[in-house]
Image: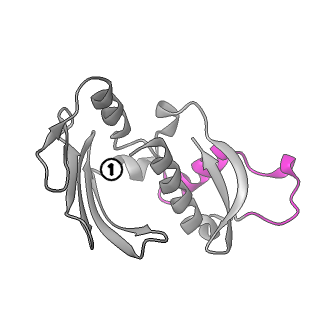
Amino acid sequence: MTFTTLNLFLSQLLFQSSAMLGIMPEKGVPEAERPTGAAIVDRFIEVTGGKAAYDKLENRVRHDRIVHVGMGFEDKADVYTARPNKKYVHIKSEVMDDVENGSDGNVVWYLPPGGSPLVETGDARLAQLSELAFDRMDHWRTYYEKAELVEETSIDGRPCYEVVM
């Protein structure tokens, strides 16, 4: 998951949960009274079960929809992750061949459409492995220097905070 993807993922999680969290942006709140990015992420973790609940998880399965804006099609992705840093992704496309990628925690690989498997090496491999940490959300301070509240924005017309890590 790249830096941008993680921010989008966190934005979606925070947006989807913001009403439950009671941290939806309010119009006209002075900047000094807004929660910090760290407070928003910590609150999200707390109300979704807390660190203890996250620590009990051994694996996750997600079924994503990838919308290609302005292109008229979308893809579906099945994402399987497991502790400590294992991942398998299968992207099924309406217009292209399927794509697969993953890691067993050591080998990082990619199977492009119609191509031969590629194995990441060197810095590219290390970068991918650092992004695969299963506990990156609930132990975010281990992986990121800070969580910064960038702005109040909206998704589908609903207000939310944008937090960059």
| Residue 154 left/right relative to 110 | right
Asked where in the image residue 27 lies, by quadrant, the reply is bottom right
Q: Which residues are magenta?
A: 25-50
Residue 16, magenta (yes or no): no
Circle count: 1
What residue is rendered at 74% in x and 50% in y?
A: 35
Point out residue 150 in the picture as x, y percentages from the top left corner. Answer: 70, 47
Across and down, in percent, residue 69 comes to 48, 69
Applied colour scheme = one colour
x and y percent of residue 60 in the render? 29, 57
Check if residue 29 falls in the magenta segment: yes
The amino acid at mark 1 is Lys
The one of 152 and 50 positioned closer to us in this rendering: 152
> Residue 84: percent from the left, percent from the top?
27, 39
Note whether 156 is above or below 25 in the view shown.
below
The residue that disc 1 covers is: 56
